[in-house]
Image: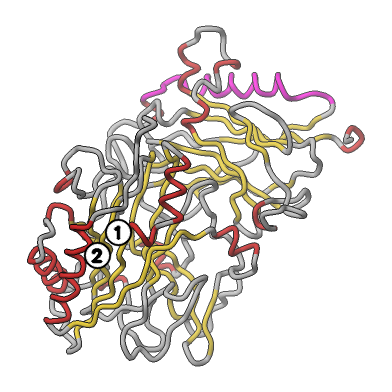
Amino acid sequence: MHKDYNYCNCDENNEKKVQEFINSLEHQGCIVQEGKLKYVDILKYCSEGLVNNALGNNAGAPYALALVPPSPNQESDIEFIEEGVPYKLRPDEAIVLIGKTPPKAYYYSFRSFLFFVKNKIGKDYSDNSTIGNAQTGKYHMIFGSLGDTINNYNINTENTPDGTLGYPYDSSTIIITTADQYINHQVRKSLIDVGFSSDIMNNDNIPEGLVNLGLERGKDTFAILMRASIWENKDIGQEYLDNLDKYWHVLRITPKKPIKNNHPWPVPTLKIRETCKTEFNLLPHARDDLNYLRYKILEKYYSKDYEAIDLKTNIWVMESFEGILMDVNVLGESRDALYLKTNNFELTSDDDFVITYGVNHTQTGKAVYYNSSFYGAKKLNGVSVIYSPDCEGSANEFFPKDCEVANNYYVYKMARKGCGDCVAIVPYSTGNPKGACYGVNNYQEAFIGFRLYLNQETLVGPAPYDVIWDQAILFRKKKKNQH
C-alpha cells in the first residue's frame, strides 16, 4: 500500500444530505432516531460473562453490530451485549445505514439476521443462548441470515455504482433494511429527493414469510451485522473499526401513523452454490496426492514419542433458512461461506499440536480465502487462526522439489509454541491478560473450524460437496515422554 494512502471520513456534502433526508422524513410525518454502528469484540464480552459463548467467532476477523434505538412507545425490549441489540421491527419501519465502506480487505459484508425468537412451549433450550424474563418474554438465539449478503463483490457504492466493477472500498454507500416493498420505495424516493443516487443504494430485505414482525411481547428480534476479513493495512482497518460512528449514520424511521403492510418482501430465491465442476474434477488425482501428503506429514512429525490421531471433519452448521425452520441456532451463518469442523479433542500437554491440511481452495477457484481456526468447544471461542493468503506454498516442503502439484495443497500447524509463517500459536485461557475466552487450556475440549469464503465463480459460499473437505491430525505426546 502507498504510504500516502489516507482513509477519509470527511464528506460534508453527504452530511448535509443526511440532515436534509432526516428533515424530509420528519416533514412527511416520520419519527427518525439515530443509532450507531459499533465494533464488537465477542471474546471480550465472553470473558466478561456478558455472553455464555463466543458464537463460533471467525478468529482474527472483526464484527460490528448496528445499535438500533427502540421504536417510539415500544413497551418491551430485550438486550444482548449492548443496548439496541437486538431490535424489533414494525412492518412499516425502516433501518437505513448511510456511510463509507471499509478500507481494502479480502472480504467485507453487511446483512440482517433473525437473532432471538420466542421460546416454544415445552421445548428445552438449555443448550442454546437464551435471554428475556417474564415481562419481555423468554427468547432463544437463531442468528440466521435472512438472505444473500451485501459484500465487496456486489455492493453498490459511489466507486461501484449499480454494482459495476470498481474499487468498493472507502466509498459512499447506503443500506436499506425493510420488510415491505412500499416502505423501501418511499425511503428510496426520499433519499433521491435530497440528492443521493439510487446507484449507491442496497436492499437488505426481511422476508415476511420467515419472520414474526411487530413490537409486542414475543415478537421476533433482529440484528444488522458487518463483517470484515484480512485488512490490506491492519492499522487503517483498526482505525476504521474504532471510529465507525464517524463513518456511519444508522437511522430508524417510524411513521407516526402506521402504514398498512400490503407489499411484504417475498422469501428470496438464493444464489446457487453448486457449479458444474467440483474439486474432484479439477484435481482428479487428489486422493493419491492427499494420501501422499498425509504420509509425508506423518513422516515429519510422527515418532515413538507421539501418537497421531486423525480427526474427523463434518459440516458445522446448516444454512440459515433451514435453521430458522428447524428452530436451531446457526451462529450467524453467512451464505458467503462454507463452515466445516472436526470432532472434539483435547491438548493434554504443551507438546501436543495439530496439523491441518487439504486442498488450496483459492487455487481451484472455490474460495477467495479460507482459514483454519482453533476453538474451545464449550465457549465456541476462536482463539487462533491461519489465513490462506499468509501461507502460500505451505505444502512445498512435503512434495518433491519443483513439483507443481504442491501448489494445489496446504499444510498448517497449530501449537502452544513454535515459529514460522504457517504456525498458529494457541494461547491459554488461564492467566490470559486479554481475558479467559481469548485462550483454551490443556484438557479443555477443543475443535478445528474451517471456513471457505466465496466461490470465485458464483460469488457465494461453495457447496459442501463441490469441495474436498479439509482435514486435521492431532499429534499427542505420549505420557511417559511429556516434559
- Residue 64 on the magenta span: no
Q: Quadrant of residue 354?
A: top right
Which amino acid type is shown beneath numbered disc 2?
Asn
Quarter of the C terminus within the rendering: top right
Q: Is residue 447 left or right of residue 180?
A: right
Quarter of the N terminus within the rendering: top left
Q: Which residue is mark 1?
A: 147
Q: Which residue is mark 2?
A: 205
Q: Secondary structure at mark 2?
A: strand
Q: Quadrant of residue 296?
A: top right
Query: Considering only vertical position in the picture, is 41 above or below 298?
Result: below
Q: Give the alpha-carbon distance from disc 1 to disc 2, as whole Å.
A: 8 Å
Q: Are marks 1 and 2 in contact (CB under 8 Å)?
A: yes
Residue nearest the observer in this picture, 264 or 32: 32
**Rendered image coloring scheme:** secondary structure
Relative image position of residue 112 (x, y in whole percent):
34, 63
Most common secondary structure along the magenta stretch: helix
Q: Is residue 313 left or right of residue 376?
A: left
Relative image position of residue 66 (x, y in whole percent):
38, 66
Q: Is residue 359 visible from the viewing direction of this image?
A: yes
Which amino acid type is shown beneath numbered disc 1?
Gly
Q: Is residue 176 left or right of residue 56?
A: left
Query: Considering only vertical position in the picture, is 274 above or below 39?
Result: above
Magenta residues (range) = 282-304
Q: Secondary structure at mark 1?
A: loop
Relative image position of residue 82 (x, y in whole percent):
49, 72
Query: Considering only vertical position in the picture, is 459 above or below 137?
Result: above
Residue pictured at 44% horizontal, 80% vertical? 118
Residue nearest the observer in this picture, 268 or 468: 268
Residue pictured at 60% horizontal, 41% vertical? 312
In front: label 1 or label 2? 2
Q: Is residue 113 visible from the viewing direction of this image?
A: no
